[in-house]
Amino acid sequence: MNSAENERFQRGLAKLKEIDGEAGERVVASLADIAPDFARYLIEFPFGDVYSRPGLDLRAREIAVVAALTALGNAEPQLKVHLRAALNVGVSRQEIVEVIMQMAVYAGFPAAINGLMAAKAVFTGLDDLTAAQSMSSGQLGVAG
Amino acid sequence: MNSAENERFQRGLAKLKEIDGEAGERVVASLADIAPDFARYLIEFPFGDVYSRPGLDLRAREIAVVAALTALGNAEPQLKVHLRAALNVGVSRQEIVEVIMQMAVYAGFPAAINGLMAAKAVFTGLDDLTAAQSMSSGQLGVAG
Amino acid sequence: MNSAENERFQRGLAKLKEIDGEAGERVVASLADIAPDFARYLIEFPFGDVYSRPGLDLRAREIAVVAALTALGNAEPQLKVHLRAALNVGVSRQEIVEVIMQMAVYAGFPAAINGLMAAKAVFTGLDDLTAAQSMSSGQLGVAG
Amino acid sequence: MNSAENERFQRGLAKLKEIDGEAGERVVASLADIAPDFARYLIEFPFGDVYSRPGLDLRAREIAVVAALTALGNAEPQLKVHLRAALNVGVSRQEIVEVIMQMAVYAGFPAAINGLMAAKAVFTGLDDLTAAQSMSSGQLGVAG
Amino acid sequence: MNSAENERFQRGLAKLKEIDGEAGERVVASLADIAPDFARYLIEFPFGDVYSRPGLDLRAREIAVVAALTALGNAEPQLKVHLRAALNVGVSRQEIVEVIMQMAVYAGFPAAINGLMAAKAVFTGLDDLTAAQSMSSGQLGVAG
Amino acid sequence: MNSAENERFQRGLAKLKEIDGEAGERVVASLADIAPDFARYLIEFPFGDVYSRPGLDLRAREIAVVAALTALGNAEPQLKVHLRAALNVGVSRQEIVEVIMQMAVYAGFPAAINGLMAAKAVFTGLDDLTAAQSMSSGQLGVAG
């Protein structure tokens, strides 16, 4: 990888961290042994090229991807990553639910129901994490 | 249709006019002879129920539908209606192009290329209309 | 919800019970916390509007949905609900298997195989339930 | 092709004539130069094997295929063939419209609208043919 | 089944063994109770008719099916069967990974990522099997 | 675009010429006004990155893409480009027809029929071009 490629990779990595946080990094890590070049492409093209473009803010980009993956209905792991990403860039839970519900119109009720179940799993996972952290810090408080 | 149903239909019709203008009305008209009840459902459920909900603005809703229909890749007439609708509710041509380009990541390059060709056809159609109108009013000006 | 809307909801709920029995109710319940309005739409539009229409009997409607969900191949939970629904409205196991097999022609062998595996799981589940119930009543009989 | 294969082919050809009439034959003819063996498979497997099976009547089979092709949304020529086939085996226009409308629930409104437009084209084509034939026989009457 | 049909079935069964080995046989076995005729069709049409044709070697056929099932993204069990089949007929792991990566261009990154995860699971499963076998024979060696 | 990016673009452009010849260039040209950056990405990522990789020859890559686009069934313009590309890199007409026929197994008969019709159109177009050129050079011969 020469310096220019490296610049594109670094830009993508920074954008990935901004959007997907740990979830995106786990996807990249899971690709490292089977297809390391693909892990690099995933950072360079979607994140280094597309998501880094001006002209559409990250909220709109995440609304678009949540809509598309709900409608396609065959990429649940990626939908869950982007549900977290949407929250990370400032889309509210209510807005996410509205986007998914709207997909019933364009891709049918099953696609929307499965999207809502994915959102429920992600939101519950985050709530459990928050609860665990606050309980943990509460215990620390008691301990302190 | 009783008064409550009628209220839902009227709300949907108003929302359809706000979003899709004439294009949406043409779709409804084309359904009138083959499936008049379906024309009514199309106004009542997507527009009277879903698009009328608070919690997600129309710009975000049109970004979501342009993304989804580009990704699905099998609904060109509806994509074109919503490309015009997106412009109507304040999504810029540049933003539309960004949303469609982004779909290359989630549904592949052919889906994005076909979406861009649909956008090009819609934008050109609108430009031709504008040119025809300004030429027409120019001639009137000369004539006056 | 005004009285007219309420009428549509009640009609949908009655139709849902007639078709899907408990399975449909579980879907609605699972949506209650994440998207309560969507749970209501699911009763009102598909069941209150579409399935309540005259002009096509419920056997034909369930054959249509089993065919469509098998062909789409990305909505297994909903396919399983409608496999039970099809049995509820009088489609035989043999007819269900015929519909799914036919989908190999229109959507490929993998879609048909996955549909058959879903049918096998549903039929086995129902047989186990019947066996458990008859064993239970048998024991009661012995006990009595 | 030995005699047993020939039997399967003949059974398929008879079934194809029963179901699709001329439309099916045109599809087979269009394949004859590019892939003659595929034209034979199309008669043997779908029609000689699947459609010839007992256990599901042809009305139910055509309802299933109209549903599936409407939901998939990427096979308009084949959907049109089967809209005519459905009529041929006794599914009414109203029942066809009901099946397609129902697909809005499972594959979204665009799939249903495009299916309804295909039905409208097929029904109009048949009406025009009937009108032309009755006008033609009327003229013959005058001529006679 | 008469002798000619039997010939087609035998040819398909031999081809299935050549391509898919045990994995294909397990699929056929899983269909035996729910749809025994479909298990027979699966051997006769795909394997007895299509895969037995000259004009395209098995390596190319397995590359085609790995590409298609990765792109469709809704048939993971069948993709896994054909990942093993591809290895069986001489497609290397590297070539398989290249085919799946290429699908990012035509069906999007999620489809490619899910395909790579399926390949990783299949390759790991085979490696574990090899390791278990060599350990087992090693122990035998020690034992001997 | 800095020098490293430029290198990737040049490599992609050379690969595109090798594979798709004029057809690919027309696609790029058609994108130039609506989304010039996307035209660049199309050269850089699919052709500069993916198709330029060692580890899978171009014949196998074109077999993979013909299979995938036939199976997806919603990208006819791109399928036609790649049918020509497949011929360009040495896949025979017979092999192309075999790949498409095989897709009946994985994506259904309609997908395969529509793929065969696309192949027929492409092959006929090339034959007409050859006939026109040989007639033209014949006339030149006469003229000379």
Image (tube, coloured by chain):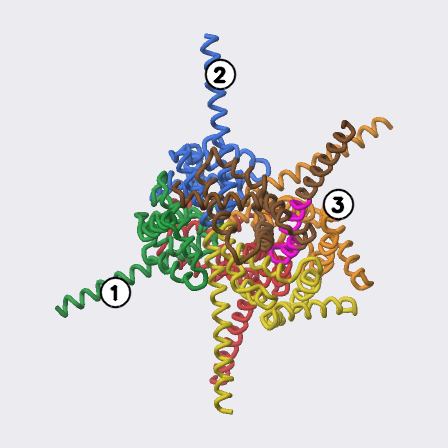
Chain colours: A red, B orange, C yellow, D brown, E green, F blue
Instruction: Pick out the residue farthest to the top.
Output: F144
Name the residue at 71% across, 38% down: D128
Q: CA distance from mark 1 to mark 3?
A: 68 Å
* Mark 2: secondary structure: helix
Residue corresponding to mark 2: F136
The residue pinned by badge 1 equals E132
Q: Amino acid at mark 1?
A: Ala
D106 in magenta: yes
Q: Are marks 1 and 3 on the same chain?
A: no
| Callout 2 touching callout 1 (CB < 8 Å) | no
Query: In this view, which residue lies farthest toward the left?
Result: E144
Query: Which chain letter goes with mark 3?
Result: B
User: Which quarter of the image is occupied by the N terminus of chain C?
Assistant: bottom right
Callout 1: SS:
helix
Instruction: Evaluate if marks 1 and 3 touch, with contact meaning CB atoms under 8 Å apart.
Output: no
Q: Say if A132 sits above or below F65 in the image.
A: below
Alpha carbon distance from label 2 to label 3: 50 Å
**What range of the chain is rendered magenta?**
D99-120
Circle 2 packing at 10 Å, graded few (<14), some (14-19), many (20+), is few
